[in-house]
Amino acid sequence: MTGPLAASQNTDSMTFTLAARGLSCRRNGRLLFENLSVRMNAGQALALTGPNGVGKTSLLRILAGLLEPEAGEVELKTDHARGAMPIAARPRSGCSNWASVI
């Protein structure tokens, strides 16, 4: 394999965990959700349902590191040597075009 992922960093053998704890989100002065926690491992899916305006897209944006939560934290954990990295600290290259879609 060439490029940014060397053979020693093969993602097929890595495990990933996305963990969010105590998330709260307020948009335009309105509290959308508070004290929300979720943990997902590689291969798991999350279905968000609900009426317009309840915070589904805001939650996805927070989990992706595109929106700061009012409270709480989101962390992406891997078994890679670097270990856990807060979402806010991740490099954001390549996200700007995707962010406009959300």
Image (spheres, grey):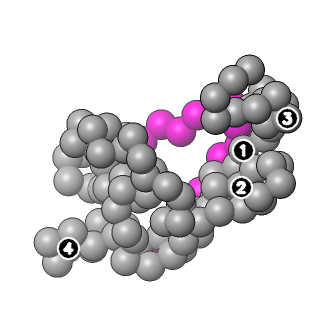
Callout 2: SS: strand
Which residue type does callout 4 highlight?
Answer: Arg
Identify the magenta region: 35-48
Seen at 39% across and 40% down, the residue is: 94
| Residue on which disc 4 sits | 30
For this view, does 55 lie left or right of residue 12? left
| Residue on which disc 1 sits | 16
* Pointer 2 with pointer 1, Cβ within 8 A: yes
Q: Nearer the viewer, mark 4 or mark 3?
A: 3
* Pointer 1 with pointer 3, Cβ within 8 A: no
Give x and y (percent) for residue 38.
59, 57
| Residue on which disc 2 sits | 77
Callout 3: SS: helix
Q: Residues within 10 Å of mark 4 (few under 14, many from 20)?
A: few
Question: Closest to the observer: 67 or 49?
Answer: 67
**Res 10 quadrant in image:** top right
Question: Closest to the observer: 39 or 15?
Answer: 15
Which comes before the other along the chain, label 2 or label 1?
1
Give x and y (percent) for residue 67.
34, 62
Give x and y (percent) for residue 2.
69, 23
Distance between mark 4 and mark 3 Cα atoms: 46 Å
For this view, does 78 lie left or right of residue 35? right
Which comes before the other along the chain, label 4 or label 3?
3
Q: Nearer the viewer, mark 3 or mark 2?
A: 3
**Res 3 quadrant in image:** top right
